[in-house]
Image (spheres, rainbow, N blue to C red):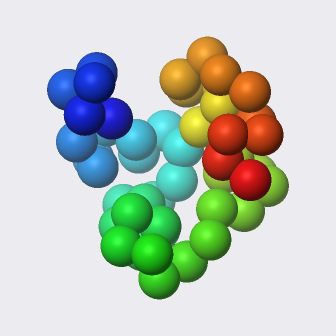
Amino acid sequence: MEQQGLKQEDLADCAPQSRISEILNGKRTVSKEIAKRLAKRFKVSVDLFI
């Protein structure tokens, strides 16, 4: 996110704001579905998020 100058709200297409916040703060793990969305958004392998 930092490399691309993104903020939490920029990931609203991947998950709700509250979920992104919990993931970034280490309170929640990335689900398979969100991992797929993030991988598509950042054009990387799903494995990076699981």
- In the rendered image, residue 27, in percent from the top left (x then y), is placed at 47, 82
Q: Is residue 38 left or right of residue 22?
A: right
Q: Is residue 19 left or right of residue 45?
A: left
Q: Is residue 47 left or right of residue 30?
A: right
Instruction: Name, please, the residue furthest toward the top.
Output: 43
In the displayed structure, would residue 8 be above or below residue 43?
Answer: below
In the displayed structure, would residue 32 be above or below residue 35?
Answer: below
- In the rendered image, residue 9, in percent from the top left (x then y), is placed at 27, 47
How many numbered marks have been drawn onto this rendered protein structure?
0
In the displayed structure, would residue 33 be above or below residue 29?
Answer: above
Residue under the point 52% across and 53% down: 15
Nearer to us in this view, 11 or 48: 48
Instruction: Name, please, the residue furthest toward the bottom.
Output: 27
Residue under the point 62% across and 71% down: 29
Residue 49 visible in the shown view: yes
Residue 6 visible in the shown view: no
Residue under the point 55% across and 25% down: 41
- In the rendered image, residue 37, in percent from the top left (x then y), is placed at 65, 38
- In the rendered image, residue 5, in percent from the top left (x then y), is placed at 20, 26
Q: Is residue 42 left or right of residue 4?
A: right
User: Which quadrant, please, contains the N terminus?
Assistant: top left
In the displayed structure, would residue 39 be above or below residue 27?
Answer: above
